[in-house]
Image (cartoon, helix red, strand yellow):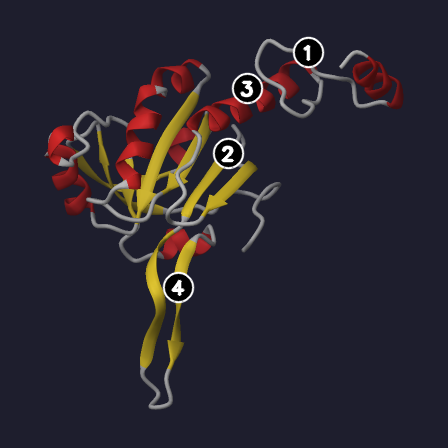
Amino acid sequence: MSVLVGKKAPAFSASAVINGKDIVNNFTLEQFKGKYVILFFYPKDFTFVCPTELFAFQEKLAEFQSRNVEVIAASTDTEQSHWGWLQMEKNHGGIKGITYPIVADTNKTISMNYDVLAGDFDWNDNGEMVATGELIAYRGLFLIDREGTVRHQIVNDLPLGRNVDEALRMVDALQHLEENGEVCPANWSKGKAGLNATHEGIANYLSTH
């Protein structure tokens, strides 16, 4: 699994569904330069854990937006699949009401470039291409800063849903660092003091906690 932290987020151009209903082509990260981005991958449309995550991000969307953060989802399904799922009511297993972009990584290159693709391609003894494992995305999440650099990443296995509050906390930590020049210790949350990255600053912090 690649570590992308500290590196430029891999660029992409793909179809996506925006505003819960509009299919657009050539959706890119570049259009959000100057904003923070939470890019998260999920395995499949029309499944079970995935809608709980998608709705959890929607519930916190205003909080992300108030921090100048664009939330973007992606899976290896087609844009038509995304669109169909978005038209279904929640009580029928759909995700109607999701308004942030959902990217269609149909050719799986985005998932491969972010190294969250479960499975791989191989060759058998007859020289035929085969797939090892199901070629869908793990639950990867990437926090990308205003310059397009990955500052945080986490990857969960397929059955393990993420904590959206933790993603929001990491945004707060990054912005606290940028605004105050203070690093964020263990279990830091917005409103708490950071610490100066010096021996004296750390000693003072530890003596009071």
Q: Are marks 2 and 3 in contact (CB under 8 Å)?
A: no
Q: Earlier in the sequence, mark 4 or mark 2?
A: 4
Q: Is residue 155 above or below residue 70?
A: below
Task: Please name the residue shown 79% across and 23% down the image.
Answer: 197
Name the residue tied to disc 3.
172
SS label for mark 1: loop
Q: Residue at coordinates 65% horizontally, 20% vertically from top-left?
A: 177
State how far apart marks 4 and 2 are (Cα).
25 Å
**In the visual, does 191 lie left or right of 144?**
right
Q: Which residue is mark 2?
A: 144
Rendered location of residue 135, percent (x, y): 33, 61
Q: Are marks 3 and 4 in contact (CB under 8 Å)?
A: no
The answer, for residue 195, to whether it is visible in the render is yes
Circle 4: is it few (<14), some (14-19), or many (20+) Cα within 10 Å? some
The residue beneath circle 1 is 193
Residue holding disc 4: 119
Q: Gap in Å between the C-alphas at discs 3 and 1?
A: 12 Å
The mark nearer the N terminus, 1 or 4, is 4
Q: CA distance from mark 2 to mark 1?
A: 24 Å
User: Label 4 amino acid?
Assistant: Gly
Q: CA distance from mark 3 to mark 4?
A: 34 Å
**Corner quadrant of residue 205:** top right
Question: Which of the two labelled residues, at mark 3 and mark 4, occupies the earlier sequence position?
Answer: 4
Q: Quadrant of residue 62?
A: top left
Mark 3 residue crowding within 10 angstroms, few (<14) / some (14–19) / many (20+): some
